[in-house]
Amino acid sequence: MGFDWDINFPTTAEIAALHGEALRSWVDTGTEAVAEIVGKPAERVRSRLTRTAGVKNLGAADDEDLRECLRVLRTWLSDPASYTPPAPKPKIQRPESIGQLPVPRTLKQAHTETTCGLCADPVKPGDLVGRMRDPKDKQFVPMGWLCAHCLYERREKPRRRDVVLRIFHHLFASSAAGLNAHECAVLRTWLTETEAPAASTAWRNDPLDTTVVRLETSVTEVKGTTWIAVPTAHTIITALLDAPGSSEAETALLRAVAQHLDEWQTNPQGIEARRYGTGVRYRAEVLKTTSRPTVLSERGGPFDLHHTPPPTAEPGDTADSTA
């Protein structure tokens, strides 16, 4: 009797909601089902699964890796003819200098439709995806499967959303956001291409003229890092909400960042400082328990987006550092 995968095996949406032992149980079930369908020993299927999913050791795999295993298994169950050796890993030319990111831990082709674990853009079957190595600093949370842009180009050819995400995760983990010259150029243009941000209440209450000059200096001098402190970053996010011409995705992300920055300041859930302190653990708990979930709270964090650590003392608006 064949395995009724269409009824029993988790859908793509259900896979995204599974955790821990439930994931491992379905990996075992799916492996046995594929072995029955293709007529191969379960251990051979498991070996091909780990290579195809880019997972070295299933026993040590985290939830994100196990979810990818389930996506691969679902593809094989849906189309047994797709049970083939994994495609050769592509050789990617990484950007150099200030836009370069570390070499990913693993690369592969996506097996099903999904979304990037950082920017949330859609990923189609066949698209390049990968995972970065686990961060050495344990205050950071490992990122999930990232799209090709977030793996290689988000610092060399940053989009507006890349800059906003960078500001968010830096302020999640520390007291300042660090941008390279490419990111400073994007932010400067966004702040100055129309008069709306400068006319906003946020800008009038906390003028950003000096910040714009610092961004221009970073671009001219091709600086590796220019630091922006929390209050200024908060003003930037709020002022950009008044900028016309932002895409729907940009506006939604700005609103989400503004919401979470406000919640970190006001603590609407009443998170106990005695238990969580006032730093990263506190911010993570506020994000996790928000009454208004966003794409940011769904992904959690903070993520290590690869930057020079900020100065020990909290910098003012004029603080600056070059990586």
Image (tube, rainbow, N blue to C red):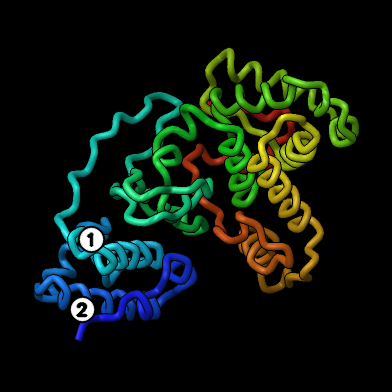
Question: Which badge, 1 or 2, is on the more N-terminal residue?
Answer: 2
| Mark pair 1, 2: CA separation | 19 Å
Q: Secondary structure at mark 2?
A: helix
Which is more toward the observer, 204 or 265?
204
Q: Is residue 92 left or right of residue 80?
A: right
Q: Residue furthest bottom?
A: 1
Choose mark 1 or mark 2, whichever is in front: 2
Q: Position of residue 171 (x, y in %)?
A: 65, 47
Amino acid type at circle 1 is Lys
- Which residue is located at x 81 percent, y 59 percent? 266
Which is more toward the observer, 261 or 63?
63
Q: Is 186 placed above or below 178 here?
A: above
Q: Position of residue 263 (x, y in %)?
A: 76, 58
- Which residue is located at x 84 percent, y 31 percent? 203
Circle number at residue 56: 1
Circle number at residue 32: 2
Q: Is 79 placed above or below 123 here?
A: below
Report how many numbered discs are placed on residues in the image. Answer: 2
Q: Quadrant of residue 80?
A: bottom left
Circle number at residue 127: none
